Amino acid sequence: MYFILTAKSLLWVTLSVLSTITMFMAIYSPKWLVGSVDYKCNSPNKLVLQDTNNNTDPQFTATCRPSEGVYYRCTRINGNQHCGSFAVEGLSTDSSMFPTAWKIAVVLMSAGVFVSFLMSVMAVSSFCKQAIRKKSMFGVAGSGQGLAGLLYLIGVICFAAGWGSERIVRLCGAQSEPFVSADCTTGSGLYTAAFGVFLTFATAMLSGPADRATSSDKVALQLEQGENVVFLL
C-alpha cells in the first residue's frame, strides 16, 4: 500500500468535502426566498423591555423578513423571529404546507448529499488506495460526484417549479407562479445551493486530472525507488 499525495489530488479531496458540506448547509437554510415586507421582531440577542403601557422598547427590537427554504422557514411568532421546519409530518405533510415539488427537491438533494458523502470518503481513501476492483478510485468517485451534481441541479429546479404553490403565493404575492417569485427576492440559501451545484460538477471534472497526477511518471519513478510515501506538491 502506498500513500500518494499530489497538489491536484489534495485539491480534489478538499473540494469533495467542501461541496458536500455546502449542499448540506443549503438544504437546512431557511432563506432560499425572502419576502418583501418587513416586520418588527424582538432582537434574539437582547432582552425585551416593556414600559408600564406594555410597549416594547424600540431599541430592543429589530426588523425581520419572512423567508422560505426548501425545508425550513422563518416567520414571526408572538413577536419573535422563529425559524424551523414547516414539514411537521415529514414527506406526508399536506401539500398546501409542503409543496409536492419541494418534497421531490428534498428527496433528490438529500440523496445527492448521501452520494457526495460516500464519494468524499472514497476521495480521502484515494491517498492510500488508488484502485478498487481494478477500477480507478478517482474515476468511480468522479462519476458519483457527477451523479450527485445532477441530483442537486434537478432538486433546485424542482424548488423553483414550486413557486406557484399556495405557500409562496402567501409570501410573494398572487403573481407568483412556477419559476417566477413575484415580490420575493432570492436569498443566501439559494445562492449557497447554486454554488454547491457548481462546486460539485467542478469537483467531478477535477477527478480526471487528479487521477493522472497520481499515476504520472514522477510518481512511478519514486515508487520504483522503493518509496512508500510520495509527495508531489
Image (cartoon, grey):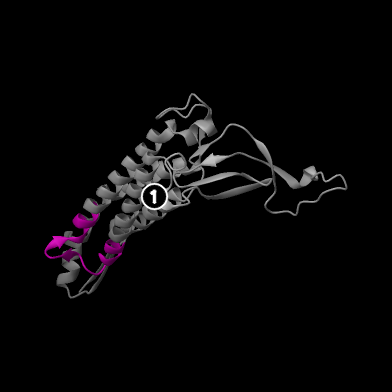
Q: How packed is label 1: few (under 14 Cα within 10 Å), some, or many (20 or more)? A: some
**Closer to the camera in the image, 227 or 103:** 103
Q: Position of residue 117 (x, y in %)?
A: 33, 59
Q: Tell me: residue 163, above or below residue 130.
A: above
Can residue 178 be seen here? The reply is: yes
Which is more toward the observer, 121 or 87? 87
Residue at the farthest right position: 52
Residue 123 is situated, as x and y percent measured from the top left of the image, at 28, 61
Type of amino acid under label 1: Leu
Q: Is residue 41 left or right of residue 13?
A: right
Q: Position of residue 202 (x, y in %)?
A: 31, 46
Identify the residue at horizontal 44%, vertical 48% (top origin).
Answer: 26
Q: Give me the residue at 31% from left, 55% from top.
A: 116
> Up-down: is 43 above or below 7?
above
Q: What is the quadrant of the C terminus in the image?
A: bottom left
Residue 184 seen in render: no
Identify residue for label 1.
Answer: 91
Q: Looking at the rendering, in which quadrant would you find the N terminus?
A: bottom left
**Residue occupying image coordinates x 25% and y 64%:** 126
Q: Quadrant of residue 131?
A: bottom left
**Residue reaching furthest top?**
175
Residue 35 higher or lower than 24, as above or below? above
- Residue closest to the eye, 96 or 104: 96
Total numbered labels: 1
Q: Give coordinates of residue 79: x percent, y percent.
A: 69, 45
| Element marked by disc 1 | helix
Question: Between residues 40 and 149, which one lies in front from this camera angle?
Answer: 40
Q: Is residue 74 magenta?
A: no
Q: Which residues are magenta?
A: 121-142
User: Does 133 lie within the magenta span?
Assistant: yes
